[in-house]
Amino acid sequence: MGDVDKQHLTDSAGVGGVLDSRRLFGPNLFSAHAGAVLSVTCVNELEIQAVAEWPAEATRLATALGWSPVECVVRRSSSEASLFISAPIDGLLTATEVAEEAWMRVEPRVKRNAEPAESVLSRLREMYADERATMPGYVTLASSARESGRNVTLSDDGLLLGSGAGSTLYPRGGSDGDLAVLTSEGSDQSHDQSHDQSHDQSRDQSRDCPIVLVTGSNGKTTTTRLVAAMFRASGRVAGWSCSDGVWVGDDQVEHGDYSGPAGAWSVLSDRRVEAAVLESARGGMLRRGLAVTSADAAVITNVSVDHLGEFGVESLADLTEVKAIVLRALRAGGILVLNADDPALVGLSQRLTTPVAWFSARDSLAVNERIAAARSNVEANAGLSVDGDAGRGFAAVARAGRVLLRFGSGDGNARGWHDVIGVDEMPLSYRGIAAHNVENALAAALLAHVMGIEISVISQVLNTFGSNEADNPGRLVVRHVRGLTIIMDYAHNPDGIASLCRVATGFTANRRLLLLGQAGDRDDAQISALAGAAWRTLEFDRVIIKELPSMLRGRQNGDTSSLLRQALLDAGAPEERLAFASSELEGVRQALLWAEPGDLLVLGVHTERDEVYALVDRFGESER
C-alpha cells in the first residue's frame, strides 16, 4: 500500500477507496510546499465526480483551521486520484486527516453517513492543537529561514535550519519557553534555556553549506560519489548520501540505502560537513518529498522507464516530472544540469526558466540543433555550439576523445572550451568502453564546475577515481580471477542492463555469462523489458536467472524469474542456454562452476554484494 502515515487503512482499497496517506515534508511532485497527500481509487463515474468535488471540501476544512493560503492539487492516473493539500509544517499529520475527512464527505459510498461538520471541525482543531504543541515556534523559525534563503529540513526528529557546519537543530517535543538548540556532537553551540522563545529565535545563527542534488534513473550513485570526491579534493569536508549509505569525510556513518530524506537529514545535520551531495531517488521524493528547500545546483542524469505504476506514475513523462522535483528546491540563481542526449530532458527544458547547463557525450550537430529548437535561449544557458564560440554558459562535452568544460560568463576565466582529460585516461571509463560512465563523469564534472571547483581539481579526480574498487563499490567492479574476467554491477532497469552488456562486448572473451534478476515491484512489462534489453545487446552463452527472495515485493517466489525466462525466449535465447538459481549467491556459485579460463562473467549484484565479493575472493584464492 505504500508508505502510509495512517495505519487504519486496512484493506486493499482502504475505507471508501482510500489507498495511501502520507505527509510530504518538503518540495514534492505537487508543490514547492509541505503538505499531505491522499490517494484513492478512481475508476467509475461516481468516483470521478467525487474527485471533482474533493478539493473544495478539503480547502473548506483547512481554511476553517486557519490555514491560509491553502494549496490544493489533484493528479489523476488511469485507476486512481491523489489530492495534495498544503499545510503549516506543524500540522502535517492533521493535514492527512483533513484530506481523508474531505474525501469521506464527497465519496458516494460513505458521505450519507458522514460525521456532522461541526463535530469534524472540533476534532480536527483538537488534533491540530495537540500536534502544534510538540513543535513550538516551528512555523516562525522556518518562515524566517526561508525568507533569508536558508535551507529548512523537517523530519519526525525535529526542524533543521541551515545545513552542515552551519546547521541548527530544534528537536520535537520542546515547549514555548524551552527552545534549546541541540547540535551534533562536537558543536559548541548552546542556548540559555531561561531565555524566551523570541530571544532564542533571534539568536539563530544557522547558515548553509553548498548543497547539490543528484537524481535520474541511472548513474545517480556514481555521479554522487564523483562530485563528493571533487569537493574533497578541493579541500572541503564533504558529506554525501547515496544508495549505499552516508559518508562524512572518511567516515561512513550509515549503511544501507540512504538515497532519500533520511540520508539527506544525516548529512545536513552533521556539523562537520562543509559541502553536501545528496542522491535524491524517485521513491523518497514521492513518499516524503525532498529533504531540502534550498539547493545551489542539481543534476538529472537521465530518465528511463522504471518503477512505473507506483504512486500514480504511469509513463516516461510522469517519471520526468518526478525527477524534476529537484527544481523546486533550487535557490534563486541555482543551476540545473541536464543530459543533452536525453530526449525527455530536452523536452523538459522547453518549460524551464531555470538556468540550464548541458552535458553531452555525443556532442553532435543533431544534439545541438535539438537543444536550440527546444529552447530559444539555450545557447545562453548551454553553450553547446559546435564551433565552441557562441555559448555563454556552463557546459561539458566529450569531443574527439577528450572531456571539455566550458566556463560560464562572468567568472573571470577565459571564455571557450577547456580541455580536462582524455576519455581513455579515466579509470572509470575502462578505456572508453564504459560509455555510461563517460556520461556520469561529464555530469559530475559539470556539476562540480558550476559549483566553482577548479578544473585542475576536476581533472585530478577524473584521472584517479575508479582505480581503487573502494571508490565506487557495487558499480562496474571488474576483477580478473584465475583466468576469468568478472564484472559486477547494480544494473536494475533496461537502460542500465543494456549499458552493462555493451561494456561486456568490449572485453575479449571465449564465452560470456550473465547473471540476471529483478525486484518484484516492477510490472510484468518492465520485468520482461529487462531481459529483452540484455539479450538484444549481447547474446550470452549462458544466462542464469536468479531469484531475489528479499525483493519479491508482493509477488510469489518464481513469478519474476518466469517472466524473465519467457522474455529471453521471446527475444531468441535458446532454452538450453538458460539456467536458474534460488538466490543471488547461488547464481554466482553456478557461474563460477561453469566458467573456464578466458570466460567473462557479467554478474548483476543487488542484494548480497558483500557475500558475492567474499565468494569471488575465496574462489580466486583456492584451487579448482
Image (cartoon, helix red, strand yellow):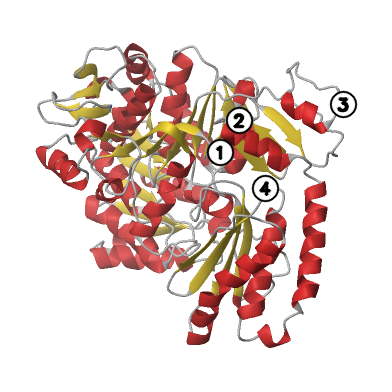
Q: Earlier in the sequence, mark 4 or mark 1?
A: 4
- Whether label 3 touches label 1, CB < 8 Å: no
Corner quadrant of residue 554:
bottom right
- Which residue is the site of mark 2? 268
Q: Earlier in the sequence, mark 1 or mark 2?
A: 2
Q: Which residue is mark 4?
A: 89
Which secondary structure, mark 3? loop
CA gap, disc 4 and disc 3:
24 Å
For marks 3 and 2, the one nearer the N-term is: 3
Front disc: 4 or 2: 4
State how far apart marks 4 and 1 are (Cα). 14 Å
Q: Secondary structure at mark 1?
A: loop
Residue at the disc numbered 3: 193
Sequence order check, earlier mark of 3 and 1? 3
- Tell me whether circle 1 and circle 2 mark residues in contact (CB < 8 Å): yes
**Side of 590 relative to 496 (left or right):** right
> Circles 3 and 2: CB distance less than 8 Å?
no
Pointer 1: what residue? 292
Mark 4 residue type: Ile
Q: Residues within 10 Å of mark 1 (few under 14, many from 20)?
A: many
**Can residue 254 be seen in the rendering of this structure?**
no
| Position of residue 586 in the picture relative to residue 198 (left or right) | left
In terms of secondary structure, where does tag 4 sit? loop
Q: CA distance from mark 3 to mark 2?
A: 25 Å
**CA distance separating discs 1 and 2:** 9 Å
Q: Sequence-wise, which precedes: disc 4 or disc 2?
A: 4
